[in-house]
Image (cartoon, rainbow, N blue to C red):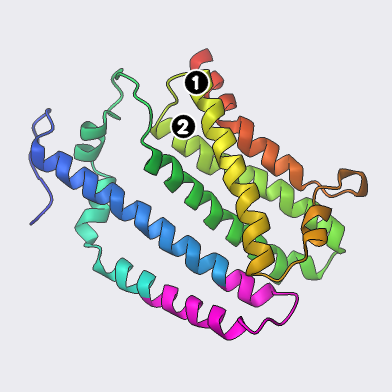
Amino acid sequence: MSTPQSADSVANQEDIEWAGRAERGIFFALLLASILGWSAYALLTAQSFYPLLVLRALIVGSCLAVVTAFVLSIPAEGIMYLASRRYRLVRGYGGEARKREPAAMWKVLAAWFAMLLVSVANGAIRDVWYGKYMDELAAHQLSTLSSVLLLAIVIRGFTWLFPPVSARQAFSIGLLWMSLTVAFEFLFFHFAGGHSWQALLGNYNVLQGRVWPVVLLWIAIAPYVFFRADRAR
């Protein structure tokens, strides 16, 4: 089956089906890539040796195989379709005013998985590059700043594609993302990364220059900030 080629100004059923498949493909790709990226990060930065280290290595390898197979199975024409005028027509991104509807939960989660991938990249850059040339606290603070900027790009992209229908929904999305991030940080980095609870809690001590809470605060309020910015235009 090839991508729809019609030049009509009205989306047909084939367009809608293609849009749904392309969006679901992106969602699962982000999910699997997030699992792979964070598993690899935990494996490489574990602070203690667990008997489950080998198991974690097997998990990383399995995730790599799954992600590779998944990515290779996505037709190139399907990826191109996401950037096409036909897709924008189906989803109402053609520039005309459209009725705002709440974004589906899987789209909210897909954005969060994208934020996880950005965080993996941000942490990896710190560990393999500038973190080696400055003290740990300064590297932490610089990493926090870059994280805020990178997450702003992801969150802005989400609010542009799927504008919140109200200030309340914008706050709800931000609080959900923040809650997922806190839960992920403690559970994943403790049980998979081998970090102690004390070390994880230490990132919240702003009196000692640990500014991680700034990232959490930004995640919580960014959807509302962009929602208000759009409404003010």
Q: Which residue reaches farthest right?
A: 207
Query: Which amino acid type is shown beneath numbered disc 2?
Result: Thr
Q: Residue at x 22, y 38 (%)?
A: 85
On the image, which quarter does residue 55 sit in?
A: bottom right
- Is 148 included in the stretch rendered in magenta? no
Q: Amino acid at mark 1?
A: Asp
Q: Is residue 2 visible?
A: yes
| Relative vertical location of residue 96 with respect to residue 200 in this rendering, above or below | above
Specify whether residue 125 is in view.
Answer: no
Residue where numbered disc 2 is placed? 159
Q: Earlier in the sequence, mark 1 or mark 2?
A: 2
| Residue 65 % position (x, y) | 38, 77
Please tell me whether residue 102 is drawn above or below residue 56 in the rendered image: above
Q: Pinpoint residue 224: horizontal percent, then vertical percent.
A: 57, 25
Q: Position of residue 120 (x, y in %)?
A: 59, 61
- Residue at image position (20%, 57%) is 77
Q: Are marks 1 and 2 in contact (CB under 8 Å)?
A: yes
What stretch of residues is rendered in magenta? 40-65
Which of the pair 82/202 is nearer the observer?
A: 202
Between residue 168 and residue 209, name the one nearer to us. Answer: 168
Residue closest to the far top: 232
In the rendered image of this protein, does residue 68 appear above or below residue 202?
A: below
Q: For mark 2, does the 10 Å Cα neighbourhood hold few (<14), some (14 to 19), or many (20 or more) residues?
A: some
From the image, tell me which residue sits under label 1.
230
Residue at 78% from the left image edge and 65% from the top image edge: 196
Q: Which of the 4 image quadrants contains residue 202?
A: bottom right
- Characterize the magenta stretch by its predominant secondary structure: helix
Magenta residue check for 56:
yes
Residue at point 48% right, 52% down? 113
Q: Seen in the image, is 41 located left or right of residue 15? A: right
